[in-house]
């Protein structure tokens, strides 16, 4: 039952959020903050090993053709359930290849069985139980 409620809440948030990032909350005691987009391009240092993309390894330069689009998420967990609905879009002809997170940010893709090859996707970032979560969720585009 909680999973169904989360998915329905996410669907409602996607309609209400025009900016591409917003908070989903059942109360006011949990706070959610989503900060601006960070984009890492060729030559920048990869923040992590990227699953399914051998070319992207932590501490190594990002190869030509790749772009990592990120959103910083800070969720201070109170007594209510909350998360952040994030929309990631690759520019031009680039398509999604993978996702990677740094810090304690977690995510799950919503509304699709596979995001690989799509230009845009919504994901839900939620905190660990009883904890404050902070980190960056990156979409890997190529």
Image (cartoon, rainbow, N blue to C red):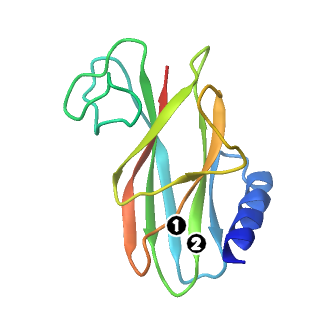
Image quadrant in which you'd find residue 138 = top left
User: Where is 134 relative to 94, above or below?
Assistant: below
Q: Above or below — where is 55 with respect to 57?
A: above
2 or 1: tag closer to the N-terminus: 1
In the displayed structure image, the side of residue 80 where residue 105 appears, left or right: left
Given residues 139 and 57, the one toward you in this image is 57
Residue sitting at x 19%, y 32%: 59
Q: Which residue is the extreme one toward the left?
A: 59
Taking the spot 58% from the left edge, 78% from the top edge, the residue there is 81
Which quadrant would the N terminus be assigned to in this image?
Answer: bottom right
Say how many tags the image has.
2
Q: Nearer the viewer, residue 67 or 28?
A: 67
For disc 2, the neighbor class at 10 Å (few under 14, some 14 to 19, many from 20) is many
Q: Position of residue 57 (x, y in %)?
A: 26, 30
Q: Secondary structure at mark 2?
A: strand
Residue 43, horizontal then vertical, whole percent: 27, 18
Residue 5 quadrant:
bottom right
Alpha-carbon distance for marks 2 and 1? Answer: 7 Å
Mark 2 vs mark 1, foreground winner is 2
Position above or below: 77 against 100: below
Name the foreground residue: 52 vs 122.
Answer: 52
Left or right: 118 as drawn, with respect to 41: right
Q: Is residue 83 left or right of residue 110?
A: left
- Badge 2 vs badge 1, beta-carbon distance below 8 Å: yes
**Neighbourhood count class around disc 1 (C-alpha, 10 Å): few under 14, some 14–19, many 20 upward:** many
Name the residue beneath numbered marker 2.
82
Residue corresponding to mark 1: 32
Q: Which mark is residue 4?
A: none
Q: Which residue is more in the foreground, 29 or 94?
A: 94
Q: Secondary structure at mark 1?
A: strand
């Amino acid at each position: 039952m909680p999973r169904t409620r989360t998915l329905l809440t996410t669907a409602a948030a996607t309609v209400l959020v025009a900016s591409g990032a917003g908070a989903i909350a059942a109360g006011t005691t949990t706070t959610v903050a989503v900060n601006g987009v960070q984009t890492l391009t060729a030559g920048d240092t990869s923040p992590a090993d990227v699953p399914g993309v051998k070319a992207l390894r932590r501490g190594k330069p990002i190869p030509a053709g790749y772009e990592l689009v990120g959103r910083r998420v800070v969720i201070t967990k109170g007594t209510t359930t909350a998360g952040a609905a994030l929309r990631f879009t690759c520019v031009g002809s680039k398509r999604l290849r993978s996702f990677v997170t740094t810090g304690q940010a977690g995510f799950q893709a919503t509304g699709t069985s596979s995001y690989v090859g799509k230009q845009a996707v919504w994901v839900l970032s939620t905190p660990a139980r009883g904890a404050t979560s902070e980190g960056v969720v990156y979409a890997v585009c190529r």
